[in-house]
Structure formats: C-alpha cells, structure tokens
Amino acid sequence: MDIKILKPLGAEISGLDLNILSEDDSLKIRQCFLDNSVLIFRNQKLNPSQLKNISSLWGKPLVHPVFKGIEGYPEIIEIRNYGEQYHTNAHWHSDVTFEESPPDATLLYSLVVPEEGGDTLFSNQYLAYDDLDHDLKSELSEKKAIHSNIGVLMLSGGDLKDAKTVEHPIFREHPETGKKALYVTEAFVKKIKDLDPKESQQKLEFLYSHASQEKYIYRHKWSKGDLIVWDNRSVQHFAEHGYGDNERTMHRLTTSGSKPY
Ligand code: SIN
C-alpha cells in the first residue's frame, strides 16, 4: 500500500483493492484516516454490497434520516445531477449535523463524472480552530450552536412537522484524536444559543468565512471509480456544480457517530 500525504489535509492511498483487505491494511487505513481526515482511493470497483461492506471499517452504516436509499440498500443514497437549478450540496457543511449523533464518516463513490466541474472541496477544521484568535476561542468555548433539519426537509419535499433542532458545541473535540475542530456548518446552523440574534449572525458569518479559506482546502477532481472517505468530525465539504445538465452520479453512505462534545 502506498500513501501520499496531501496538504492541507487528505491522503491518497494506492496499490490496493478495497475488496481484498488484510487485517494490517485495515489498521493502516484507520490510522491514516485519523491522521489526515480525508482518504482518496482511485480506480475501485464497488457495487452497493461491496461499498456497504467496506464502510464497516468506519462504523455501522446509517440510513439517512430524510433521503431515501437505493433499492435493496437503504443506507446508500444516490446523488445525481438534476441540472444547475437543483444542486443540493453546494454549501459548506459536515453531514447530518441536525441529528443528536451525526455520522462519523461519509463514503462517496463516483459512478459517472462530468468532464468539467463537479469537484468536491474539503476544508480542514482542525486548522481553522487552531488559527482562531485566543479571545474568540475563550468567548465561544462553552457556547452551543443550534442546528436544524428544516432546509433538508424543504429540499426533499419532506413533512415540515418533522422539523427539529439540536444543539452542538461550536468547538468539537474529536473523540479519537483528542484534537479540537471548528464545528459550525452554514447549511444547518440557525443561531448561536444565548446570543442576541444580531451578534449571533455576525459571529456565525465570521466563522463561516474563516472556516472556508483557501489555505484549509483540498479540492478533488473526480474520476470514475474514486472512493473518498471523510471525517465529519474534523472536515467540512462543499460540492461544486459547474457541469450544467451533464451527468454526475455518486453513491453515498454514512457511518454511525456519537454526540459531539
Ligand atoms: C455531500 O455533500 O454529501 C456530497 C458531496 C458531493 O456530491 O460532492
């Protein structure tokens, strides 16, 4: 197995068929994931059953609370282009933070990729946290952000009676690495609890633009057969559009997580 470390986050692992992993390979992959937050495997052949099988390296596969899975695999959602008007993930987010225990990892496998556009951007939230001003860190260290599923419900045509909010810390400690990461996502956060609306809005706008600076970002240009696995506890991502009505089809699966602290 060859590992190429990318900057400012991520590692590309090659010389490996994910369908045939030794115990030692699995341990190395797990460690590399914790050290680099995003793993890239190219030229993989993964049908839904194999994708689900591999996901057990990161946890128990989860059924998405809003989007319906593919036939026979409720845990796998298909992300397919519907044209420029409907691009669901073109905003910075960590996955499903509107749940009490958001998923630890997401696996995204490319089936059809456009020649141009459709990159996914990943931003290192450990670095974003480290670089914050000391006073702001102290001020927000005990504060919670309120995350809501309303946007996803509206997008999916879900029942708005199922709308809910959850609270998570603004700075999250990674349960396995012990490092702190910035954990506010523009897609799902509504406000900072116990701040007046104006101050909450100002602070959030600052944190969003801080979190998505170029210096924290790895940009992935997809090829067919790429599998990317990212750590939702330390990374935010953004699915860029820019491929018009051309096809882009991916299979996505998330794995079980725990309550952020
Ligand atoms: C996602 O936001 O979960 C999917 C990202 C992508 O389609 O690139």
Image (cartoon, helix red, strand yellow):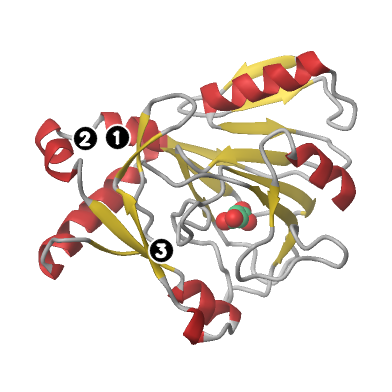
- Residue at the image position 56 percent from the left and 68 percent from the top: 88
Q: Secondary structure at mark 1?
A: helix
Q: Secondary structure at mark 3?
A: loop
Q: Is disc 1 in contact with disc 2, using a CB cutoff of under 8 Å?
A: yes
- Residue at the image position 74 percent from the left and 38 percent from the top: 56
Give above or below for 196 relative to 160: above
Mark with earlier residue (3, 1): 1
Cα distance in 3D space between marks 3 and 1: 19 Å
Dot 1 corresponds to which residue? 129
Q: Specify the quarter for ligand 1.
A: bottom right
Q: Residues within 10 Å of mark 2 (few under 14, many from 20)?
A: some
Q: Position of residue 141 (x, y in %)?
A: 20, 40
- Residue 189, by quadrant, is bottom left
| Residue 118 shows up from this direction | no
Cα distance in 3D space between marks 1 and 2: 5 Å
- Residue at the image position 65 percent from the left and 70 percent from the top: 67
Q: For this view, does 173 lie left or right of residue 116?
A: left
| Residue 201 shows up from this direction | yes
Q: Position of residue 92 (x, y in %)?
A: 44, 55
Dot 2 corresponds to which residue? 132
Amino acid type for the residue under numbered disc 1:
Tyr
Mark with earlier residue (3, 2): 2
Dot 3 corresponds to which residue? 188
Q: Secondary structure at mark 2?
A: loop
Give above or below for 108 relative to 41: below
